[in-house]
Image (cartoon, rainbow, N blue to C red):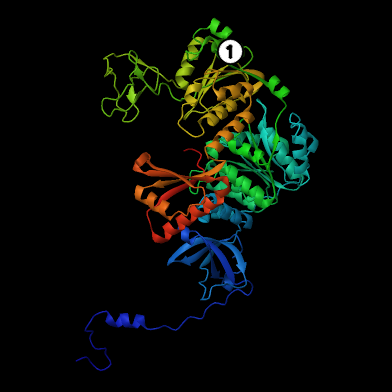
Amino acid sequence: MADRGESPPETLPGLRETVRAARPKRAAKAEPLAASDPVARVLVDTPLAHLDRRFDYAVPASLSDDAVPGARVKVRFAGKALNGFVVARAADTQHTGTLTRLQRVVSPEPVLRPVIAELAGVLAERYAGTRSDVLRLAVPPRHATTEKQPSAAEEPLDVDQSSARAVWSAYPAAEAFLGHLSREGAPHAVWSALPGEDWPRLLASAAALTLAGGRGSVLVVPDRRDVARLDTALTDLLGAGHHVLLTAGAGPARRYREFLAVARGARRIVVGTRAAAFAPVHDLGLVAIWDDGDDLHAEPRAPYPHAREVLLSRAHLEGSAALVGGFARSVEAEQLLASGWAHEIAPPRDALRHAITVSIAGATDFELDRDPLARATRMPKQVYDAVAAGLERGPVLLQTPRGGYAATLACERCRTPARCAVCTGPLAVSGPALPPACRWCGTVDEAWACAACGHRGLRAPVVGERRTAEELGRAFPSTPVVASGGDHVVETVPAKPAIVVATPGAEPVAADGYRTVVLLDTWLALARPDLRTDEEALRRWLGAAGLAAPGASVVAVGDPAHPALQALVRWDPAGFARREAAARSEAHLPPAGRLATITGELGAVDDALTLLDRPPGTEVLGPVEVDGGESRLVVRVPRAQASALSRALGEVQRVRSARKLDAVRIQVDPVTL
């Protein structure tokens, strides 16, 4: 028996502590709520589509000053501590129970402006995604050390408006557009640039005129090289310290520093790649995108928005001007003109005729008489003549669509593709003195023999830029040859005679422009099995030709009867875009309609189709098997039902999320199909 005053021994060890822990405890005195607007509406960072809405939280008095709209907070949600953004403060709530309190304010810095929060909702609905996914693209990760530093104020600036307008003198319709910019108007335009145009200088001038009117600008370009050119143009025009650069490669600290300068209103001109389209510029007056047909403008992460659509949505929400420019014209840009939403800014035909001359090798009987193999050889005599003539005045550019040395090989005798004996992968040669090796497993096959005829000779049906540079180096032995493509991209070349061989998108910028531009293997660019094959091929050719000097010549090697090459010869991207738009309208393809793909496991795709509330006129194509063993379904509707389809797909995502069904990937108006 236990002594008096001692607890008796436990029959069940641990039971006593469990009972004590289960007894109700005296509630701690609750901290009072904020005296003003004690309710915070928070957008919680959760990937679950059925929870993509604002939730109300109580604001303790100690957090009231810091929990401002746009601030990052930590909240309790479904038993977990999650991040979120305060999107609004309110005096009351419609929730009938007791509100959960904010755990803490991560940062009082208002990084999410109300208009960007509204934009996130618009894009989430349009692309059948969630606002959380959109905000991950719009707001960079926090960098605490950088956040503590103030943003330097912008120095006063007096813009020379007459000089800024003068650089647009080649475009008669530009005067009205620029006038609206400086008077706080909101014009919308599609701009077709002259070949050889210094387009960064023109965009910088448009941003300067917008700044003179007291408003900011967002200028979006495809890649970092274009960012660098536009950065130089703005610095030359306005001086340093009047704009910021927002690119993914800038590093977390620098990118967040530049973002904060914009969010705090210290800078009002933003230049960058696709992520810059979300920049929280105060008093936004102009959004502009260069070369909107470039697939780099398409976001590869959910919900896969396109920078052009982001900017056009901002122009609508914020009442700003919009400018879509390029040497080529996308079908979507042509749709803006056809609908009357935008006006055209284009040079007169006389200016185009004096700016550039485009020809196709072997297009006339006279050229075929001089060179009967002009249409059969990769580099006919006309190409060598054009290169030689151009080298007398400066650098020459040759664009070839395939990178590397010899990416594909075939038997020299019977033309059977050369395959690896180990894994049947394609053989390739990566250098002039290297043996063939498999592109899949890397096995070197020095003693290769054709499985069909036993011949040991190899030929390269398609050669890359390095092999092309080697051939030209032998033809012009006293001329420097520069290869640009793949991992070795050359930024600029001087205004000296040189041969530059580059892949599409890797063409260096010549100091005074190229004297001759040659487009090789055009058939290969037109052989891609894609919805936008012809449009993309013409865009690449016009982009290379746009680097030519005024009065330069362009020679293309290909079929003179192909519509894309005919448009190149006439320099008629507008007419080509109109024909493409008409063809897509007949096929019910974007932008004449809305198209979405649903990709995933076959069962998950079937479930999604079953859940889809199909709008009137819906067409379903598939499912078909795609890479990785997945299946893909295509859904398309007329343009009038575009919004209804996006809402229906969004509802599919919410139901699928709530029921914990297998995941599917939904892409609305994908760039490729």
- Residue 46 in sight from this viewpoint: no
**Rendering coords of residue 671 (x, y %):** 51, 39
Which residue does the image show at 71% across and 28% down from the upper left? 347
513 shown above or below 154: above
Q: Is residue 286 above or below residue 387?
A: below
State whether residue 540 is above or below residue 314.
above
Along the line of sight, which residue is nearer the eye, 302 or 647? 647
| Residue at 58% across, 11% down | 364
Task: Name the residue nearer the viewer: 143 or 231.
Answer: 231
Residue at the image point whose x is 75% and y is 41% from the top: 209
Which image quarter is the N terminus in? bottom left
482 horizontally vs 91: left or right? left
Residue lying farthest left? 1
Quadrant in the rendering for residue 404: top left
Q: Residue furthest right?
A: 162
The disc labelled 1 sits on which kind of residue?
A: Ala
Pointer 1 local density, CA inside 10 Å: few below 14, some 14–19, many at least 20: some
Q: In the displayed structure, would residue 284 be above or below residue 20? A: above
Quarter residue 88 falls in:
bottom right
Task: Give how far across and how far down residue 237 sits, in percent.
Answer: 72, 36
Q: Position of residue 178 (x, y in %)?
A: 75, 39
Q: Position of residue 543 (x, y in %)?
A: 59, 28
Q: Residue at x 56, y 22 (%)?
A: 565
Identify residue for label 1: 386
Which residue of the protein is positioned furthest toward the top in this rendering?
369
Element class at badge 1: helix
